[in-house]
Image (cartoon, rainbow, N blue to C red):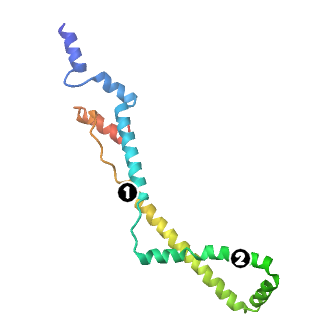
């Protein structure tokens, strides 16, 4: 009787369960998996929240942003207006196009450079804002979320719990 008691004490004694610990090496601990999944969902929601926060800008900044949004729609609607004007009054339209044909070529080059620099600078500024937003998102995502203590971390077999935390088991 003493040998059976000693064997059972070895397996289940001192707050241990060797069978469960051995089985957990080969199968995933469902409780720890649920904790990791909850932590991942919380980190994902925190990332989304940080991405969709808007900066408070002043009146001047909002006014300039509004003006910066005007050239593309004005050019598109202006082109549509020219097409409509050509259909409504072909004589008026041809007189205006004759005037455009008399504009010297260097002035067209200057106009092209100004438009190119405007859109190029805007593209560069938007690209930098996007890169800064991505860097800020990665900086917040790189911080590990606070973890809850699991049953394994409070058990006497702390080495096994540490190995599981490092290896994602």
Identify residue for label 2: 81
Distance CA(mark 1)–CA(mark 2): 48 Å
Identify residue for label 1: 140
Quadrant, the C terminus: top left
Left or right: residue 55 versus residue 83 is left
Q: Considering only vertical position in the picture, is 4 above or below 65?
A: above
Say what secondary structure mark 1 lies in: helix
Whole-percent x and y of residue 26? 39, 28
Left or right: residue 70 versus residue 81 is left
Which residue appears farthest toward the left when viewing the image?
2
Q: Nearer the viewer, residue 135 or 93?
A: 93
Q: Considering only vertical position in the picture, is 52 above or below 4?
A: below
For residue 8, what is the image quadrant? top left
Q: Is residue 167 visible?
A: no
Residue shown at 40% from the left, 60% from the top: 53
Residue shown at 37% from the left, 40% from the top: 36
Residue shown at 28% from the left, 41% from the top: 148
Say what secondary structure mark 2 lies in: helix
Dot in front, 1 or 2: 2
Decide: few, some or many residues near mark 1? Use Cα within 10 Å; few <14, some 14-19, many ≥20: some
Whole-percent x and y of residue 42? 37, 46
Q: Considering only vertical position in the picture, is 119 above or below 51?
A: below
Q: Is residue 30 visible?
A: yes
Whole-percent x and y of residue 10? 22, 19
Which residue appears farthest toward the front when viewing the image?
88
Question: Counting residues from the N terminus, which is met first, the one under dot 1 or under dot 2?
Answer: 2
Q: Nearer the viewer, residue 68 or 139?
A: 68
Quadrant, the N terminus: top left
For residue 30, what is the image quadrant? top left
Which residue appears farthest toward the top when viewing the image?
1
Q: Nearer the viewer, residue 121 or 11?
A: 121
């Amino acid at each position: 009787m003493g040998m059976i008691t000693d064997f059972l004490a070895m397996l289940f004694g001192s707050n241990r369960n060797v069978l469960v610990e051995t089985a957990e090496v080969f199968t995933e601990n469902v409780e720890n998996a649920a904790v990791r999944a909850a932590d991942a969902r919380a980190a994902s929601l925190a990332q989304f929240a940080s991405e969709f926060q808007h900066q408070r800008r002043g009146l001047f900044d909002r006014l300039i942003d509004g003006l910066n949004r005007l050239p593309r729609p004005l050019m598109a609607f202006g082109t549509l207006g020219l097409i409509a004007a050509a259909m409504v009054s072909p004589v008026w339209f041809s007189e205006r196009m004759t005037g455009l044909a008399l504009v010297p070529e260097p002035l067209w080059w200057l106009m092209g450079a100004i438009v190119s620099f405007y859109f190029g600078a805007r593209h560069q500024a938007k690209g930098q804002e996007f890169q800064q937003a991505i860097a800020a998102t990665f900086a917040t995502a790189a911080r590990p979320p606070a973890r809850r203590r699991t049953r394994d971390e409070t058990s006497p077999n702390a080495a096994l719990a540490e190995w599981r935390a490092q290896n994602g088991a």
